[in-house]
Amino acid sequence: MGKTTIFDFMKAYKAALKKKDGKKKYYWGFMGDILGELILPTDEEIIEFANRDLSSTVALRFFLQPWIMPDFFLFTEESKERIRDTLAWYLHQPEKELDSIVNAFQIPIRVESSRQLYTVIWQEFFLSDFPDPIDPDEYEEDTSPEFINSLYKMAERPDWSDTSYYSNPERIGTVKKDLIEWYTPDRSLEEIQRWALTGIRPNNIPGLISDATKWLDWYDMNRGNERALKQFGELQENGLYVDRLTLTFDKDIGIGFFAGTTKPIKTRRARFLFDKLGNLLANYPILK
């Protein structure tokens, strides 16, 4: 019997999903996966975005379009269906649940409400005002490692030289190179707490209050990097493209604070972000 590859495993997993109870699957992490370039702001953008008035739906819509739509077009049809089911589920949840997602992903813009943010995203993605009422019994959360990392994109990147309406955003600064430094074990717990309470990042750049974390030690951080890069490469070899992976470890690997709190929380889960060439851009423990 030949060696089972990750591609074989994913095929079997998808088949098993279809045979299961037929429920619609959702995962909270997809709510960050759909935010495109907005999740990788430069220092200049962090400062500029935090001062923007995006309280009106119109202003928020025009701001979001170039940051999220180019990425959405790249998702496979199966991935878009998972995004749709996840958005529909969370847009029918209490506001505090949506707030916790906004804080977890350190979204760098000030919005009137988390529901307003994700309602606009729904409208842009699916061209309808709001998802129809749902039957909760038809939905089921899937936190399996295979599912939470299953938002795939087309490997071939479209040619945006046609000045499409949803062209890539014109960045204010350069693409981030030092995001990894924000979360290293060398950061003091005081720095991370200040971030959670004031929005000031470890590099002293003022932003918005959000969840804030750091790695507990270099061994786990480097081990996580190796795992994420290996998994990224295996997927790409089989024609599957991702730019975000979430990994769960068998022990606590990170510590941090939920937005606006002072009690440190440990976590076993971390998130890894890649550029289109597979270079690791960010790696941070997540608390939610």
Image: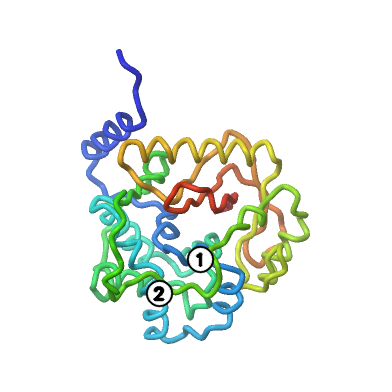
4 is higher (above) or lower (below) than 154 = above
Residue at 46% x, 70% y is: 95
Tell whether 245 sits left or right of 10.
Answer: right
* 216 or 175: nearer the viewer: 175
Residue 15 appears in the figure: yes
**Residue 64 shows which numbered tag?**
2
Q: Position of residue 279 (x, y in %)?
A: 50, 48
Q: Position of residue 169 (x, y in %)?
A: 42, 72
Residue at 48% x, 81% y is: 112
Tell me the amino acid under the disc marked 1: Val
Residue at 41% x, 85% y is: 59
Tell me the amino acid under the disc marked 2: Leu
**Residue 102 shows which numbered tag?**
1
Residue 146 falls in image quadrant: top left
Residue at 47% x, 67% y is: 38
Residue that protrudes farthest toward the front in the picture: 161
